[in-house]
Image (cartoon, rainbow, N blue to C red):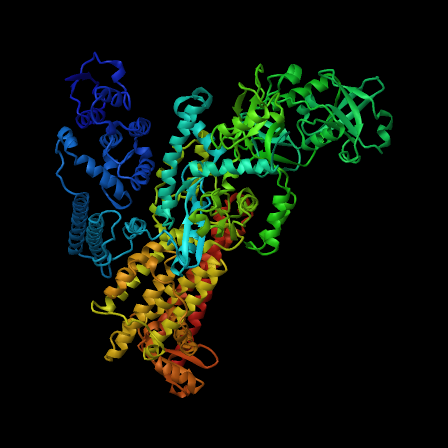
Amino acid sequence: MASLKLTAGNADQISAILVAARLSGVEIEVSYNDSTDPTLCTSGLASIAKSVAAQAASTNETFFSDKVAIDEWLKFADNLTPKNKEAALEKLNSTLAVTSYLTSTSLTLADVYVACCLPPPFKQAIMSGGKNESTMKWLTSILEHPEVEAVLGRGKPKVSAEEDEAKKAKKEAKLKEKEAKKAKAAAKAEKGKGEPAGGGGGANALKKAAAAEEAAKKKVAEELELQQARQLILAVPQGLKKNVSAAMLKAYHPGIVEARWYEWWEQCGYFRPESDSSKPRYVIVIPPPNVTGVLHIGHALTNSVQDTLCRWKRMSGFNTLWLPGTDHAGIATQTVVEKTLMKSSGQTRHDLGRDKFLEKVWEWKEQSGNMIFQQLRRLGSSLDWSRECFTMDPKLSVAVNEAFVRMHSTGLIYRDNRLVNWCCTLKTAISDIEVDYIDIEGETLVSVPGYGEQKVEFGVLTSFAYTLEDGSGEIVVATTRPETMLGDTAVAVHPEDPRYTSMQGKMVIHPFNGRKLPIITDSELVDMSFGTGAVKITPAHDPNDFATGKRHGLEFINIFTETGEVNENGAEYQGMRRFDVRVKLVEDLKVKGLYRGKQNNPMRLGLCSRSKDVIEPLIKPQWWVNCGQMAADACEVVRDGRMEIVPRLFEANWFRWLENIRDWCISRQLWWGHRIPAYYVTLPGEDGEYIGTNETNERWIVGRTYEDAMVIAQQKFPASDLKLTQDPDVLDTWFSSGLFPFSTMGWPNEETSDMKDFFPGSLLETGHDILFFWVARMVMMSMTLTGKVPFDKVYLHAMVRDAHGRKMSKSLGNVIDPLQMIEGMSLEGLHSTLRLGNLDAKEIAKAEAGQKVDFPDGIPECGTDALRFALVAYTTQARDINLDVLRVYGYRTWCNKLWNAIRFAMMNLGDDFMPRPSLGSAEVGSLPMAAQWILSRLNCAVVSTVEALERFDFAAATTAVYAFWQYDLCDVFIELMKTLMQSPDQSVVDGVREGLWWSLDVGLRLLHPFMPFITEELWQRLPRSPEDQDRTPSIMLADYPAPVACWESGEVEREMELLEAITKCLRSERSKYGLTTKQKTPVYVLCNTAAAADIVTRGASYVATLSASESVTAVRESSSVPVGCAVSIVDETCSAYLLLQGILNPQDEVLKLNRRLQDTLKQQADLSKKMDASSYQVKVPENVRNEDHSKAIKLTAELSSIEEAIAGFSRLQMSEQ
């Protein structure tokens, strides 16, 4: 028996070791003494994997599989604290939602260790179910494992999590009931002591006690109901159809409603397009999210819009493919992994070496990629997961190499030593469109990465003098970058500038290295009116100077290293940082008497979009793409209509950028990415480093593989022992992304079924911020390599900003994970997610402060449907979206109203109801007026929604759907049902039920693309024939609603429009006089026309129901209206009279209103005094001033309302006299 001595400092860890030993078949003796082997005293991998696995040579290998992933989870378990509870649970939930175990398809050491080390509060939260459902099943399965129980014992009764939670809820409720009863008894005792006349203290206490008791009972009932619903869900294995046979919950709970549907859709293959289909096709490829981390709310917008379109098209009869994938995101991913590596181990990528570092990046990709796909599933994205791809998959990598080889062979890709945009922080070149520019008006101190608290001066023009070689004087030049003068190789003047005619052709002496610089003339570069009219030329560090150097054959001297320090060409400044040199050079110029001052100079400063470091132009031999003809072709396809850009206003941006495009640098000095398939030839006898330093372009060989390149090299350089060295650089990420629409379909094999059936695509939907990064490049590369435009349309949605209109930024704390909004998260949980990231302490503090302001109570649980609907509803073409969490929660509340309305409606359908197969003109004509009206309104909503979707007007589409459900179905028809269902005429009842069923069925299908989960849940509950259930098992497969001509009835709608107008006037009058719904009064409608009277007479019961009136009577003569009525003019055809006589005492009401008027006037006077104070604008914070302004407006409106009510009651009082 193996004897391992382990410390007992952590009982949970010891338990995990013992469980691991039993599961691996190793016998372990644990002794708790002081002579412990120090190598076995650490937690995590050292104390378990090394201890147990060392003895498990011939035991269960799968239990210890993927040790790297296991090690990460062991560290995760060792760092569990109450502070990171929310974030830790989110990590568990997101992982276990897509797999049954943490690192494998079977139980491993990671599962046992994490389960054993979970603190009690974590276990309690997990066992509460809800959004922790998958994690709850995982934990229960582990704790109930025989080997686990053998070690940990059966200390807890073996009950299900649901039963345990129900008992807990019951216990809490009983305690609250007990407290309520005590309060009730105390109130009775107090009342028994006697109360002063008119006193109501005891009565109020009794009411409060009774209310508390009722609330406690309600809470326990709700908890039990939820637990039963969860049990019903868990009883069905994932992937099988959800059981909806139970009664609907009394309230909407997104976690319950959204559970299980997605797994069933995916398992049934509903997301996959049909093969060999005759249907019209609809194809979208997802803008592949970067595998740098979790998705943010901008991704949620993108996928909500795309899924809405795909579900709509799929239901509309299109063979729909929405292809998923992720992007390797070279710079971003490498940066994140490097930061993580430094944070966790203090190592750099160079410490590991290229191969080992890439292994780490692949591990990150697997972890992050799985989380991204889980988020997409939670968003309800109906992606064809059978086609899931990654830009560095073998299939796509073959396409990348092929594209490079083909484009190189035609001269589109070439090697050249040119200026690049260099980022000293990332140590790589970046493209022009990855440079962000900020405008600086004058002298400004700017924070630069790597300089800490030290800020760097920009926005000034520094002047200094060069002394002429012959001693005849000096020439003064001006620059915004004094440090670059170390690389100056000339001074340029305008050939027609008389000030410098005598100096042309002479030499000046460099004051720090003695180099002689010629004074040249150049009319293209020099502006005589700017500065001194003399320009220093630094060809190796400025784009304009580079061109000048080429024209004049000047020397190109690079003075910076890749990290932004001065190199050996900087003489005494070698080794200093570039912006430190800026300061030192100016000081030294002053010492030499050559400094001539500085002045403000407005400028645009280029920053790396990734690191925010100041871009440094450097000369580097790189691979470039000649974009001239490709860009021209991309312009032409938009001009001739082969591709449409929506909104059209972005066409101007498209043309402006492509018509001024420069060649594209595609080399990146990274390790993560597609290694450039180019090889440098070294001939026998040649030693040393050539690539990037002493290389010759003729030595570069491009080949699909090393073997191909070797064959070409031997043909070009016949030598038996030549050597090939592959370019260490990788391709720009956007190069592979530019191939995405067709590399994912099997290109370069043009004969694959996917290339034939699904390329070109139908639509490219994305944010307008990557119009040039990605969209333009896809068009250029697709046309070049396939001869086809990759998609027919491009829809560009707006950017998502926070509620204040600010850009989402981790350092501001306003970046939102969609799951945080779907599931809700406390403020502390939001803070925890910041601490788990790569932000430094200052950034975390700033972000936490931002979160406290924006989310003082955390983020409430909104659910997927509410989030999707809000995002799509926000989408107005070309306008940015200021996302307010409260608006999203408002749609969650709307879901609750929808739920309850349908719950009520379903009860009125009855158990035996079965709808007619269709509703033709004859059937519709026999329905009650209300049913005819709701079908006509539904038909109008269908027309509006489909037309809006066709033109990508998502705001109009959601408005049409929302308006039908909210204002037509819920506010009017379902209210009318309450009366109509009591009709003694069975044909009326049957007609109402028919109208109701068709409204629900069509209305849910209309809403489904926007809110897939709640619509599936409710649609499955509608009564349908067995044949229809078999034919259409899911709402996903049902037909999207199309207009039905015979449902449209302009006449019925006009009649109902009048009845609704009367109702609105009556409600306004009732509100004005403070009538409650219980105070029902007779109503008289004075009609000027017989037609109006007929409509009111036939619709009297509708108006009475909707306006809470006792009765509604149409009259033609004013003499028929009794005395004591309040009147409201509806329109030119009728007026509504509300009888108040006998309902209210006008005199008493006037007295009450006068008292209220005086109170309101006093509040207004006090507020005015406060706001009129001389120091108000200076001392009172802006948010308080805004609140005061709102109060003032409300008080004015309230005064107007009170005065109007007083006038009304005064008129009523006079009419009674």
Quadrant of the image for the N terminus? top left
Quadrant of the image for the C terminus? bottom left
Q: Quadrant of residue 147?
A: top left
Residue projecting furthest to the top = 35
Q: Quadrant of residue 421?
A: top right
Q: Is residue 668 left or right of residue 1128?
A: right
Q: Is residue 5 left or right of residue 713?
A: left
Q: Quadrant of residue 1067?
A: bottom left
Q: Nearer the viewer, residue 261 or 1074?
A: 261
| One can see residue 1041 in this view | yes
Q: Nearer the viewer, residue 818 or 101?
A: 101
Residue at horizontal 32%, vertical 65%?
Answer: 1001
Q: How many marks?
A: 0
Q: Position of residue 34 (x, y in %)?
A: 20, 13
Q: Position of residue 355 (x, y in %)?
A: 43, 24
Q: Position of residue 408 (x, y in %)?
A: 58, 35
| One can see residue 858 in this view | no
Q: Is residue 1132 above or below residue 451?
A: below
Q: Is residue 61 above or below residue 1091?
A: above
Residue at horizontal 74%, vertical 18%?
Answer: 510
Q: Position of residue 72 (x, y in %)?
A: 33, 28
Q: Nearer the viewer, residue 917 or 449?
A: 917
